[in-house]
Structure formats: C-alpha cells, structure tokens
Amino acid sequence: MRYSTRKPSVAVIGCGYWGKNLVRNLYNLGALEMVCDTTEVGRATAAQIAPGVPIVSSIDEITASAVMIATPAATHYQIARYALETGRDVFVEKPLALTYAQGRQLVQIARDRNRILMVGHVLEYHPAIVRLVEMVHRGDLGTVYYIYSNRLSLGKVRREENILWSFAPHDIAVILRLLGAMPIQVTATGGSYIQPNITDVTVTNLLFDHGVRAHIHVSWLHPFKEQRLVVIGSRKMASFNDIAKELILYDQRVELREGEPIPIRGNGDLIAFDDTEPLRLECEAFLRAIVTREPPLADGESGLQVLRVLQAAQRSLMMNGEPVALGSEL
C-alpha cells in the first residue's frame, strides 16, 4: 500500500513549559496547523513562536486530524481519549495516563479505530541513546549486569505530580528498551519534604530475570544537575552524560582469576553521535507514523509498559518500599 508523501498537519494542545517546544519544532517542520491553549499566557507564547498559525482556546475548535498533547499529566487520559474517539492520531506527553487501566483503554481505542498513539518518551529518540541501545543489543558490552540512572536537579517542582511520575518515565522507557524485557519485581522508596503527599526524591529498583537489576534515582531537591545513565556489562561498561553530551564506552570489567576478582581497567572511548535535537527527531517520528501508519518506536504499547512499571513503583512507594511483583499492581 502506498501513502501520500504530503507532510501531515498537526495541532498542539498546550503551549506551556514543554508544549512550547513541540510548537517550535512542528512550526519549523512546516507541520503545525493550530495551537490550542486555555490560558492567555499560553496563547501569547504560541503567537510569538508560531506567527500566522491559528490559535484557539478549546479543543472543540481543533480542525487538525492529528494532535500532540502537552497538558498537565492529570488531563492526558481525558484529552487523548477525546482525540482518539473523534478520529485523530494522537501523541501524548509522558505519562500516557495516571493508571494502567486508563492507559490500556487508550491503547485499545487506538487499535479499534486504527489510529496512531505515541507517547513522549523523548530520550528514546536521543541519538546517543540510540547508539547505546545498538551497542547493547549487538553485544559490545557482553552480558548486561546492572544499569543505573540518575536524573537530579534543583526544581522545577511540580504540584500536580510527584518526582517519580515527572522524571522517571524517561529512564524506565530506556531501561526497558536496553534490556528488551519487563522487570519481574519493583521496589521504590522516597520522601516528601516540600509539599505534603508529593514525593520529592525517589529511588526505584527494578529486578529482571536472570538477576539483572537497575535502579533509578530521581530528585528535584538536589544541589546540582545530573542526568547520567550507566550500563555495566561483563565485557565493557558505558556511560551517557546528558549534561556533558558525552557517550563513553569503557574497556573495563572484573574478571575472576583463580577465584580472585581482578579489576581490569582500560581506556574510555568517546562514541560519536548525531547532534540533532531529540525532540525534533521525536516530532519527525510522529509525522512519519501518521503517513506510513506504522507504529512508532514509542508507541502506545511502549507507553503502557512504562505505565505498568510506574504504577508498581508508586504502590511500593506507598508501602514504604515493599516489593511489588509485576502483575499484582494492576
């Protein structure tokens, strides 16, 4: 089947802290048909970024056949469902919804109506992460033992969602992609210090089959900014520092020699990767999916898997770190 190569037109719903970046990229790609924002500030921002593009204040006024949703997380399910049920292709910023049941409904509606459903796991489109996934899947690091991720900063503190739901989806999505599997058990601990019942710091541990583990430390109550992902393998180790924009492959490992663990220290090689903005690549992936009707990398099913892990972590967090087996959290 052949599809039209004409660039699709998309409406962005929400032109706030993150939505304005979607507006900018779609405008530069020539695919922005309309912007919808309920606030005067959002509409004014859209007018500055995308001159000449129609701006409306209600989703009922949207005429585009596809939408990108960048509204508060609590509204994702309702707006995405409305868009799907009115026949539109949908991109929704992470998280897909606030419960697994809601996310599953969105995936089912998209499937029933043959609509594209994509989730904003932008880190999966980062050229450095794409290279890292390639290296891991090719076996360059050997057997993966452990993965850890730190996503730390001072602010921006949310009032609608906690740090787990705000920061961790990116890292969960990448870890699931690296390992090509779901964890069998999730534990999470954290603390609320600024606002009651909104966790500011969490550490989430994921246990996979064959003893592979990963942990994710996220905080918006931290003295410096750090965004680092480290993969420990049997042959080599890799580190991606998103602040320094560096992907390094270390020829380092620990070998057992006559029963003694011996650290092998080798050089670290910088791995080159494309410097295209990940968000632009993500927007291009959505536009491509609209045209080809092929599911994008970060499709609804992918978003649902991340949501499943998030919900298990939230349950463990509420139980002061009690382990939650995947399946029992639904």
Image: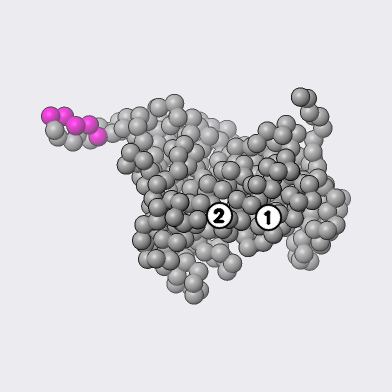
Describe residue 65's horizontal placement relative to residue 129 as left or right.
right
- Percent position of residue 221, x then y: 46, 64
* Residue type (three-letter) at the residue carrying disc 2: Tyr
Magenta region, main secondary structure: strand
Name the residue that disc number 1 marks: 70
The circle drawn on residue 100 is 2
Judged left or right of residue 4, residue 191 is left
Q: On screen, 250 above or below 53?
A: above
Residue drawn at x 46%, y 56% is 329
Q: Under tag 2, what secondary structure? A: helix
Task: Judge left or right: residue 159 versus residue 84.
Answer: left
Q: Is residue 5 magenta?
A: no
Residue 168 position within the rendered picture, expressed as x and y whole percent measured from the top left: 49, 53
Image spot of residue 20 (x, y percent): 71, 54
Q: Residue at x 65, y 50 (%)?
A: 106
The residue stretch that appears in magenta = 254-258
Residue farthest to the left?
Answer: 258
- Secondary structure state at the residue bearing disc 1: loop
Question: What is the crowding at mark 1: few (fewer than 14 residues within 10 Å), some, or many (at least 20)?
Answer: many
Q: Is residue 156 above or below residue 110?
A: below
Label of residue 30 in the image: none
Q: Is residue 171 visible?
A: no
Q: Residue at x 54, y 52 (%)?
A: 307
Residue 107 at what x, y percent from top left? 64, 47
- The amino acid beneath tag 1 is Ala
Q: Nearer the viewer, mark 2 or mark 1?
A: 2
Label whose residue precedes the other's in the sequence (2 or 1) = 1
Residue sitting nearer the eye, 319 or 92: 319
For the residue pair 273 and 157, the one nearer the viewer reads as: 157
> Can the viewer see residue 239?
yes
